[in-house]
Image (spheres, grey):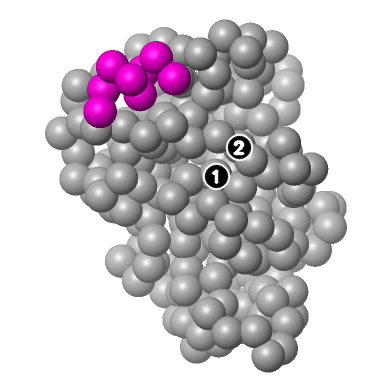
Amino acid sequence: MAYSVKEMFLTLQGEGVNAGARAVFVRFAGCNLWSGREQDRASAVCKFCDTDFVGTDGAGGGRFADADALADAAARFWGEGVERRFVVLTGGEPMLQVDDALVDALHARDFRIAIESNGTLPAHPGIDWVCISPKAGSQVVQRRGDELKLVWPQAGADVAALERWDFAHFLVQPMDDAHAPANVQAAIDFALARPKWRLTLQAHKALGLR
């Protein structure tokens, strides 16, 4: 199949358990919880997304004819002579496009594969690191993985139910919107009150990274 990618770039992972790790980010176009267009935000399930995932016109993005073409592009961004390859599949919602062929092609190029997903679609079993960021009002089917990342505050989130899911790490991240300072304090208070959770911040924004 062909893949629609908004952008692709080499950076450092800015948040979560893998923060600071060198990574190729592949941002897929499209999402099933919001069209990505401002006129649809108010009626979307996910109203707070801060990412542009519309189209294929971003740096490194485009339409890739097959899995090998996409995996080769990721390998070029990583470069030669650098071991421990790491790729992060994100979006939008990457599981709308990730399939057997792409997972196999990335593994064939020695990539460890991470995914950042809203969890409304099952994560591919071949993915090495599963990060789920649940959105209140959505039906999450991927309730196990490596990292659960809750953007906070989020009206309607059933925190007690989330804590019963099977994840190795539970992270709370302040929502990045017009109320950011208050959201940071709310996330700090959350982590202090619930020791199962750790605070994670979007360090890439503070550092000026993509």
User: Which image quarter holds the N terminus?
Assistant: bottom right
Q: In the image, 199: left or right of 35?
A: left
Q: Visible in this render: residue 97?
A: no
Return the residue nearer the eye: 77 or 124: 77
Q: Amino acid at mark 1?
A: Glu
Disc on the earlier residue, 2 or 1: 1
Return the residue nearer the eye: 55 or 147: 147
* Residue count near mark 1 (Cα–Cα under 10 Å), binned few <14, some 14–19, many ≥20: some
Pointer 1 residue: 15
- Residue occupying the point 46% across, 13% down: 186
- Residue occupying the point 43% across, 32% down: 199
Position of residue 177 relative to residue 109, above or below, is above
Position of residue 1 relative to residue 21, above or below, is below
Pointer 2 residue: 202
x then y, percent, for residue 80: 71, 88
x then y, percent, for residue 181: 62, 13
Q: Give, as a single range, the part of the protein colored magenta.
A: 188-195
Q: Secondary structure at mark 2?
A: loop
Position of residue 162 relative to residue 129, above or below, is above
Task: Work out which residue is located at the far front of the displayed protein and give it.
Answer: 192
Q: Are marks 2 and 1 in contact (CB under 8 Å)?
A: yes
Q: Amino acid at mark 2?
A: Gln
Residue 192 lies within the magenta run: yes
x then y, percent, for residue 33: 51, 31
Return the residue nearer the eye: 145 or 122: 145
x then y, percent, for residue 40: 66, 20
Residue 156 lies within the magenta run: no
Q: Secondary structure at mark 1?
A: loop
